[in-house]
């Protein structure tokens, strides 16, 4: 079997953001191996032999518009992978980088994506529980302009206070909300997201500091370990552990998959879900028993 034909990237045009480092860089390396013509974007210089690279600040509408104008007229697969950690005072910046700028860019490029093409995001296990904010996220998603969205953010400081979490929850809400919307489904464009667990990248130090209430690196590292690793005596993933599955999801291998939020966390969020279900079921049993005894 010809693996390049199986993936379906050979000779195809692929656009990927965040390609200078981490998961996205691993994905870009694999896309190049598979014969894709890669157009790569990052705020930092990209040192891979892509077809063309662009530098730009993807938190800014004008920068996104500038890059969009220079991208090819036909795109077979779009990967939106850029993101930043959260620090106090940067709540709006995190929303723009980690969600709204990605939504905006995807929609600006949608009419260029081939029929049966794909749009794939890197989200995070940090968006776990997205259902709790779904109504508000859809409200934001349906606003017609960038300026409307910025005004909405100003009017909802309580929601964006969670910064990274809310941005990722909105991204996951977007995937589930849009997968069968007319603009995607009429042309069979697939939309999915991977949700990485703890992964060692160039942003690891930032994430560790941002997790600590005091901004302390060591404390943040310990907190991350307690949340993601301690319960199963686990280890952090490497960028390729996320970048390679990302490429698979956007490929012809997954040609019938859309609207999926794929948790790549060694089963951690599944245990969170099962634990919550067991706790809820036990509570129900106890309540029934108490009612029967009265």
Image (cartoon, helix red, strand yellow):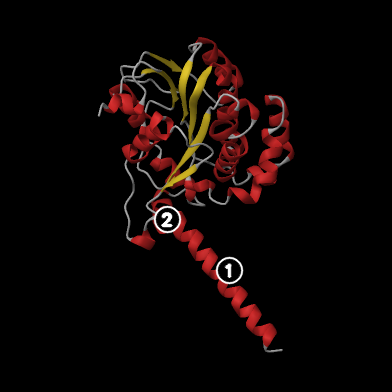
How many C-alpha atoms fall within 10 Å of the one at disc 1: few (<14), some, or many (≥20)?
Answer: few
Res 280 label: 1
Residue at x-position 39% and y-position 51%: 221
Kindly identify the residue that appears in the image at 41 percent across and 59 percent down.
Answer: 226
Q: Secondary structure at mark 1?
A: helix
Q: Is residue 218 above or below residue 166?
A: below
Q: Is 21 situated above or below 211? A: above
| Residue at image mark 2 | 268
**Residue 47, quarter of picture:** top left
- In percent of width and height, residue 77 lies at 45, 24
Density class for disc 2 (Cα within 10 Å; few <14, some 14-19, many ≥20) is some
Residue at the far left in the pictured view: 1
Quadrant location of residue 37? top left
* Nearer to me, 121 or 253: 253
Lateral position of residue 152 relative to residue 183, left or right: right
Give the quadrant of residue 7.
top left
Q: Which mark is residue 208?
A: none
């Amino acid at each position: 079997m010809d693996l390049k034909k199986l993936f379906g990237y050979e000779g195809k045009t692929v656009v990927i953001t965040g390609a200078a480092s981490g998961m996205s860089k691993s994905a870009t390396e694999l896309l190049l191996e598979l014969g894709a013509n890669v157009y790569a974007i990052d705020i930092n210089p990209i040192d891979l032999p892509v077809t063309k690279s662009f530098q730009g600040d993807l938190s800014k509408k004008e920068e996104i518009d500038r890059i969009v104008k220079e991208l090819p007229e036909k795109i077979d697969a779009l990967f939106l992978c850029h993101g930043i950690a959260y620090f106090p005072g940067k709540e709006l910046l995190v929303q723009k980088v980690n969600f709204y700028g990605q939504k905006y860019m995807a929609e600006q490029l949608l009419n260029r994506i081939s029929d049966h093409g794909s749009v794939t995001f890197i989200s995070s296990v940090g968006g776990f529980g997205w259902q709790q904010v779904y109504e508000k996220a859809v409200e934001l998603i349906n606003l017609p302009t960038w300026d409307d969205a910025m005004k909405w953010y100003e009017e909802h400081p309580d929601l964006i206070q969670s910064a990274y979490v809310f941005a990722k929850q909105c991204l996951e809400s977007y995937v589930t909300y849009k997968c069968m919307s007319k603009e995607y489904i009429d042309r069979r464009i697939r939309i999915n997201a991977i949700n990485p667990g703890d992964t060692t990248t160039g942003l690891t130090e930032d994430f560790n500091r941002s997790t600590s209430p005091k901004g302390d690196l060591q404390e943040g590292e310990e907190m991350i370990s307690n949340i993601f690793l301690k319960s199963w005596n686990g280890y952090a993933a490497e960028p390729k552990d996320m970048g390679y599955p990302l490429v698979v999801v956007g490929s012809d291998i997954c040609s019938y998959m859309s609207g999926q939020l794929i948790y790549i966390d060694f089963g951690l969020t599944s245990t969170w879900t099962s634990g919550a279900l067991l706790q809820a079921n036990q509570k129900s049993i106890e309540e029934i028993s108490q009612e029967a005894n009265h």
